Amino acid sequence: MLMPTRVKYRKAQRGRLKGKSKRGNDIAFGEYGLQALGSHWITARQIEAARRAIT
């Protein structure tokens, strides 16, 4: 896998997820939205599968 040559550490940490968001939870585009019930990472494949299931 390709990687930049000058980095201090190899692995990029992802941080942590705490709880539900207090802002940014209104729909900006379209009529439907996808809401996560827990605090987990959502991959691009999961978003695409949900988009295909909705339409």
Image (cartoon, rainbow, N blue to C red):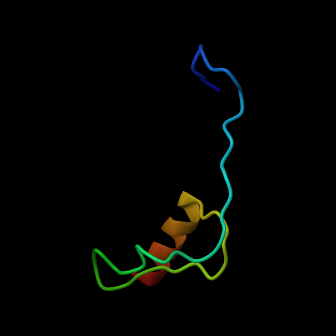
The image shows residue 21, relative to residue 16, as above or below, that is below
Residue 27, image quadrant: bottom left
Residue 44 shown left or right of residue 32 in the figure: right
The residue furthest front is 22
Residue 45: percent from left, percent from top: 56, 61
Residue 10, image quadrant: top right
Residue 35: percent from left, percent from top: 52, 80
Q: Nearer the viewer, residue 48 or 14?
A: 14
Q: Nearer the viewer, residue 41 or 48?
A: 41
Q: Give the quadrant of the C terminus.
A: bottom left
Q: Which residue is at 62% across, 20% downward? A: 7
The image shows residue 32, relative to residue 8, as above or below, that is below
Q: Nearer the viewer, residue 40 or 8?
A: 8
Q: Give the quadrant of the N terminus.
A: top right
Q: How many marks?
A: 0
Q: Which residue is at 60% across, 23% downward? A: 3
Residue 38, image quadrant: bottom right
Q: Nearer the viewer, residue 48 or 28?
A: 28
Residue 40: percent from left, percent from top: 67, 68
The residue furthest top is 5
Residue 54: percent from left, percent from top: 44, 83
Q: Which residue is at 29% across, 75% downward? A: 28
